[in-house]
Amino acid sequence: MKHFYFCPDQGRDLERKLFRSWHNVLRKYEQAWQDNDLAYVYNQEANVGVLALAAWKIGRLPFLEFSVKKLTSPGRRRRYSGWGDLSIWPMEEGGKRGGILIEAERVQRSWKNKNDSMANKIRECLKKATGDASRISEWDARRMGLVFAIPFGARNGQFEPTTFWTTLVETRRSLKADFCAFHLCKRDIWSQQRKHKDCPGVAVIGKYIT
């Protein structure tokens, strides 16, 4: 069974490499923890930390919870001191150039619930994340809003990854997001969890600020 999904099929080579590494880091946690826990079910900060490890694994320099000047609103000149979730930089001399500044959100919803759908919550969270990213007014780097989306409600080990993935790809298209990815935990690990046995994986959807 396929355990890593990425869209689009062509291009976005850096993002594909980064999130393939993210998938592999999550696999390491799952191999070590087995039925005791899952790294991705925790809060936004924990998920951002896993992504930072993934960036390091592909030769990039991650920097977490950095202080930064932010605009009071996009287009305004007034600034205040705030925090960014994650920045990722090339591992080369010459200062901070060519990096990615990421503001993240997290959502956890039933993958079957049509009334309070995952897609609607992703839309809300991506708007907030991209809004936060657009306020960062320092450093020569691209800005990105990113949402971690955790589906739950997979009872008795039953989950349809292709159905969830199709919904995620359609959500990416409707939001004009740049990419999405999905890490699917192995069934014999997630379905045997002591506490989180209905959370089969985690997805991300990202959008750069133009």
Image (cartoon, rainbow, N blue to C red):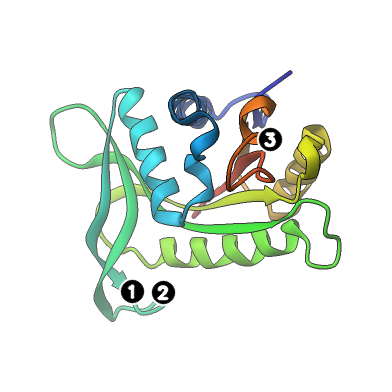
The image shows a total of numbered marks equal to 3
Across and down, in percent, residue 85 comes to 35, 55
Which residue position holds label 3? Answer: 191
Which disc number belongs to residue 71? 1
- SS under mark 2: loop
Residue at the limit of the structure toward the front, as seen here? 194
Query: In this rendering, would 53 be left or right of 188?
Result: left
Residue appearing at x 63%, y 57% in the figure: 108
Q: Nearer the viewer, mark 1 or mark 2?
A: 1
Question: Which mark is first along the chain, 1 or 3?
Answer: 1
Across and down, in percent, residue 58 comes to 36, 23
| Residue 67 drawn above or below residue 62 | below
Badge 3 amino acid: Ser
Kindly indicate the quadrant of the structure image that contains residue 44: bottom left
Query: In this rendering, would 127 be left or right of 21?
Result: right
| Residue 142 drawn above or below residue 108 | above
Check disc 2: other Cα within 10 Å, few if <14, some if 14-19, many if 20+: few
Q: Nearer the viewer, mark 3 or mark 2?
A: 3
Which disc number belongs to residue 202? none
Q: Are marks 1 and 2 in contact (CB under 8 Å)?
A: yes
Residue appearing at x 32%, y 59% in the figure: 84
- SS under mark 1: strand
Question: Which mark is first along the chain, 2 or 3?
Answer: 2
Q: Nearer the viewer, residue 95 or 157?
A: 157
Q: Are marks 3 and 2 in contact (CB under 8 Å)?
A: no
Q: Nearer the viewer, residue 100 or 35?
A: 35
Q: Nearer the viewer, residue 198 or 111?
A: 198
Which residue position holds label 2? Answer: 75
Badge 2 amino acid: Gly
